[in-house]
Amino acid sequence: MQNSDVFEKDREYIAHTYRRFPAAIKNGHGAQAEDYEGKKYIDFGSGIGTNSLGFCNDKWVQAVVSQVKQLQHTSNLFYTLPDSLLAERLCEVTGYSKVFFGNSGAEANEGAIKIARKYGIEVKGEHCNRIITLENSFHGRTITTLSATGQDIFHQKFFPFTEGFCYVPANDISAFHEAVDHTVCAVMLELVQGESGVNVLEKEYVKMVEQVCREKGILLIVDEVQTGVGRTGTFLCSEQYGIYPNVVTLAKGLGAGLPIGAVLMDKLTENVFQKGDHGSTFGGNPVVCAGAVEVVNQIANVEFLADVSSKSNYMREKLLSLPHITNVSGMGLMFGLALEKDIKAGKVAEKCVEKGLLILTAKEKLRIMPPLNISKEEIDTGLDILRECLSDTLL
Ligand SMILES: *Cc1c(COP(=O)(O)O)cnc(C)c1O
């Protein structure tokens, strides 16, 4: 089997929704992978921040395989143990009270939006159902989470969208104050806007938003689908902002590559969902949850997280010294690299993949999100490839 055989089959039978790099990844271990022709890659993307422990982490594989041999699924009509064990670990680690499991980030955000609306309507009345989100946010691809996403480009097709969202510019305190009124039940935001270019929100702004929400009885929902589970150097990114949102959504890094989404609820919101209010056929799948327990056990560890921060500092310094880079944004192992204006991120990324480095883009930036347990040597190898690609005079 050659890479081209895989490309052809995909092009014939898979709906053409993705612009893929011309690489067919066959297997991997840690931060290294191989394609169908034996070419090796260093991984600076970890899926899209999903393979938090790299490819096929030994202990995670063990946890998944042992569960899949025992029981793969029974539906949510019965009790199983792995989802409760995962929920317990998540609550221990984050201080939240209850967890709802779905299968993706968008689904987690849908859950959070439903909690916010039900809370607003029950506590304040039917008029209280609107949600403030930020410009340049990204909250998912379902019709409602596209609605929540504050980017016009996602609002051009697929009418009619879900009503009840309004968008404010990030870090603009007066615009936020203007948007708040008695119809607002919640504010939903990412602390680092991942998809739109790894833009880090200002601490002062976020603290002010939390304070206004507290004062007015508005729920604060933080979408940690991308920033959660150790990506920014703490288990939740919220910890670094010194905030405690009412609802936090997780997904990407939690399953180590298997699909899962989670809604974490605080004491105020833990009982909003009652029997029949929400559900998911596959949510809380035992195999995915057994693996995710291993993910939380490895990542919610002082030394592991300190290592993420130390590698972050190491990488940031090196990234700043690369040619044609004008700015490095991000937190932890989540970086956005702004390029000089005549250099296209997509072109550089293609070149990187060709030279053996898996890398991402976000809008006009390069985006780097390696597995959290990548080694310093692998970081160096990846950075060498990136430097070579950026130095290429033909760019
Ligand atoms: C990726 C992402 C989502 C959507 O997650 P899916 O699993 O693709 O549905 C939502 N919010 C943020 C912040 C994301 O980065």
Image (spheres, rainbow, N blue to C red):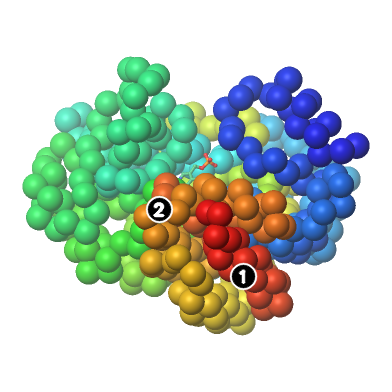
Query: Left or right: 244 with respect to 230?
Result: left
- Amino acid carrying label 2: it is Asp
Is 46 located above or below residue 286 in the figure?
Answer: below
N-terminal-most mark, 2 or 1? 2
Image location of residue 69, percent across then percent down: 88, 45
Tell us which disc is closer to us: 2 or 1.
2
296 sits left or right of 190 in the view:
right
Q: Which residue is mark 2?
A: 342
Q: Could you say where residue 344 lies in the image, as x and y percent from the top left?
A: 46, 50
Look at 65% across and 34% down and name the residue there. Answer: 282
**Category of crowding for the residue at label 2, using alpha-carbon neighbours closer than 10 angstroms: few (below 14), some (14–19), many (at least 20):** few
x then y, percent, for residue 236: 47, 64
Q: Position of residue 195 (x, y in %)?
A: 44, 48
Task: Evaluate if marks 2 and 1 touch, with contact meaning CB atoms under 8 Å apart.
Answer: no
Q: Which mark is residue 332?
A: none
Res. 308 visible in picture: yes
Q: Which residue is mark 1?
A: 383
Question: Which residue is at the front of the view, 344 or 2?
Answer: 344
What amino acid is at disc 1? Leu
Which of the two residues, 193 or 255, is positioned nearer the viewer here? Answer: 193
Instruction: Work out whether 99 lies above or below 314.
Output: above
Quadrant for residue 167, please give it: top left
Q: Secondary structure at mark 1?
A: helix
Q: Is mark 2 within 8 Å of ligand 1?
A: no
Relative height, residue 378 to residue 81 (above, below) = below
Q: Quadrant of the N terminus?
A: top right
